[in-house]
Image (cartoon, grey):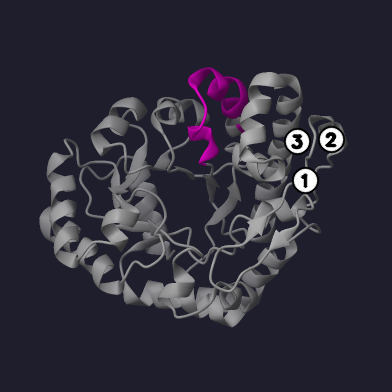
Amino acid sequence: MTDSQWKKLNQIVAGNEERTDTVGFIIDSPWLPGWNNLTKLQYYTSDPLWFHANKKAIESFPGVFFIPGFWSEYGMCTEPSAFGSKLSWHEDSLPWAGKVIRDIADIPALEIPDPEKDGLLPFMIQRLKNTEKEIRDMGHRIRFAIARGPLNIASYLRGTTELMTDLMMYPEETRTFLDKITEFITRWLQYQKNQFPSIEGIMILDDLIGFVGEEEFTSFALPCMKKIFHAFEASIRLLHNDAQGLITAAYLKEMDVNLFNFSHEHSLNEIRKLAGPGVILMGNLPPRDVLAAGTPETIRKETKKMILETQDHSGIIWSCGGGIPPDVSTRNLTAFIETIHNTLS
């Protein structure tokens, strides 16, 4: 993000803009490679191709907030790699991280990774260092320290079904498991900040927190999230959860989250009521069925409907309910952006 974009984002979060037509999207490897006619492996393994794919998005849609901007990542393999997951790579589909914890009895021996040395994390940092001059020459800065959330990482290390069962059957062991992952995430965020002083934001992505009930959320997820969002003093604290988000929304203030990207299945009105006025909402067009699969005419119709049905237009960054999915075309993004500006400006 540029200095002016970052300043405006902070003004929006601070509540200094009553009504905004700001458009922003989370973009990463599900969308960028295909949009740039690259395979997933080309995108992950070439710093120049990765850089130019992100650069093209920024230059094709000037004025749009691409968050976090130049995201150095390897899909869901990023953090599990540091714990020793076996990683499976594919030309045209997202990579996969294998299980590490085969039995609940394996948790005590699980070591907390070193972000400076373990897995793919050093490659993520080095990619940003390799391209930082080009990023800065564009007028942009590295703004966010980013990590998958504790339940998300745990679901790869243990398996989703096994993790959900463990929450009920082995609560103390699972709490130890999540505490270790939380400590790792905190160190990883701090390390990113130490490497790039321009970082002033935290971005956490965890859909698995939407898979649990309120009792499990407050017992397991909430304590972890409170610690993670205080890894360092950050002006922007973004949480992405595009699974069920009603429970999450009610606890955003307690987690100290001030920017929330959530599922299209919840309306902006519904989430605003739960989150309160102090959280900026980022959404909320259906990403796959409308933004990717719809025609420009459908997108214009659905986008205008979304705007008209939203009671309070303050504190919103207009987006889709999640990150940009595969197969979203330039013309569809343009239709969304133009409709937002034409309706609200």
Picture coordinates of residue 88 (x, y %)?
Answer: 68, 63
Q: Give whichever of discs 1 and 3 has the lower sequence position.
A: 1
Number of numbered discs present? 3
Q: Are marks 2 and 1 in contact (CB under 8 Å)?
A: yes
Picture coordinates of residue 290 (x, y %)?
Answer: 26, 56
Furthest residue toward top: 215
In the image, what residue occupies the spot 68% across and 54% down?
97
Residue 102 in view here: yes
- In the image, residue 131 sits, relative to residue 103, either above or below, namely below
Q: Give whichever of discs 2 and 1 has the lower sequence position.
A: 1
- Tell me the kind of residue under disc 3: Lys
Q: Residues within 10 Å of mark 2 (few under 14, many from 20)?
A: few
Mark-to-mark CA distance, 1 and 3: 14 Å
Nearer to the camera, 99 or 136: 99
Nearer to the camera, 103 or 1: 103
Residue 21 forms part of the magenta stretch:
no
Residue 211 forms part of the magenta stretch:
yes
Classify residue 37 as left or right of residue 288: right
Report the magenta residues as a range: 207-224
Residue identified by numbered label 3: 180
Q: Residues within 10 Å of mark 3 (few under 14, many from 20)?
A: some
- Tell me the kind of residue under disc 1: Val
Label for residue 106? Answer: 2
Classify residue 192 as left or right of residue 270: right
Classify residue 310 as left or right of residue 179: left
Q: Secondary structure at mark 1?
A: loop
User: Which quarter of the figure is the N terminus placed in?
Assistant: bottom left
